[in-house]
Amino acid sequence: MAQRSGAIPNGRKIPGAAVARLPLYYRALLEVAEGDVDTVSSERLAVLAGVNAAQVRKDLSYLGSYVTRGVGYEVAFLIDRISRELGLTHDWPVVIVGVGNLGHALANYRGLGARGFRVLALVDTDRAGLPLPVAHIARDPLDPEFDDAGFAAALRRRRTGLKRALLDQTLVSGIGNIYADEALWRARLHWARPTSTMTRARSAEVLAAARAVMVEALDHGGTSFDSLYVNVNGESGYFDRELAVYGRTGLPCRRCGALVVREHFMNRSSFRCPRCQRRPRDAHG
């Protein structure tokens, strides 16, 4: 007898216990497939998965699997069906926390990407353990280990404009062009203010503004202007609705009512309020 379907037969829901066993069957099927085998019996799957054959047949019946009496299950079809049920046909962005031997092994394991897990970042409290390509990146302002005093001192030593410094990931990470504009608006500072004029108090104001912007953005799911950047449910962030200056050229400042202006900046744009964020005489850039 043979049965094949692209959906669960009769609309039945797969029981949680059966779903929990699907990874066992999936690994067993991958092992079988490596041997260029097209079909596999329930008895063979049972041995590889560590369950009994009757349980295998019952669990797989929920998938509308293809089985031929005396021959067995079609391996490729089962792998596809189980992949769909486990969400392995989608890309799942992951962050590896802890970059010790295991973290390095996972980051370098090609099979992780092949199974839909895309490594976005590696995180560790010990900077000495970070891979060389990312070891130079500074902490972000929300990091509990971020050094406010060290940031203020390093900022003052720079000979550049304030926004350029905020986008320098060797000094501080995680702010970006949009959040830099928003933080500078909240701090009432012009993007071209020389960093050498930044007192510790002023630096603290910028950090406080940046943190507030980042926290609010996280609460709103981020700022998405591209359909590629969505959460695990496929939803875009909506912090763009709360932006005070970025992308609001010609609209009134939410604080004073002056019209927001857009200015050229590093092959990109900067947005500011011409009244709240007056250009300094010694502007850098």
Image (spheres, helix red, strand yellow):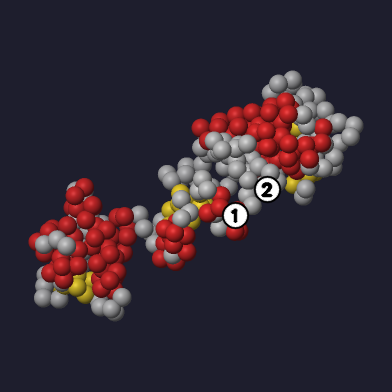
| Left or right: residue 229 compared with residue 249 | left
* Observer-nearest of 190 and 77: 190
Q: Is residue 233 above or below residue 42?
A: above
What amino acid is labelled 1 in the image? Answer: Val
Q: Residue at x 68, y 37 (%)?
A: 150
| Left or right: residue 93 compared with residue 200 | left
| Left or right: residue 182 compared with residue 265 | left
Q: Is residue 52 above or below residue 129?
A: below
Identify the image quadrant of the C terminus. Answer: top right
Secondary structure category for the residue under label 2: loop
Mark 1 or 2, nearer chain start: 1
* Observer-nearest of 257 and 87: 87
The reply to whether the C-beta atoms of the residues labelled 1 and 2 are less than 8 Å apart is no
Q: Residue furthest right?
A: 281
* Observer-nearest of 201 and 254: 201
Q: Is residue 157 above or below residue 98?
A: above
Quarter of the rendering containing residue 171: top right
Secondary structure category for the residue under label 1: helix
What percent of the width, then of the height, locates residue 169?
67, 47
What percent of the width, then of the height, locates residue 93?
46, 52
Name the residue tied to disc 1: 134
Q: Residue at x 82, y 42 (%)?
A: 159
What percent of the width, then of the height, locates residue 267?
77, 50
Determine which of the numbered discs, if any, sits on residue 170 in the image: 2
* Observer-nearest of 89 and 209: 209
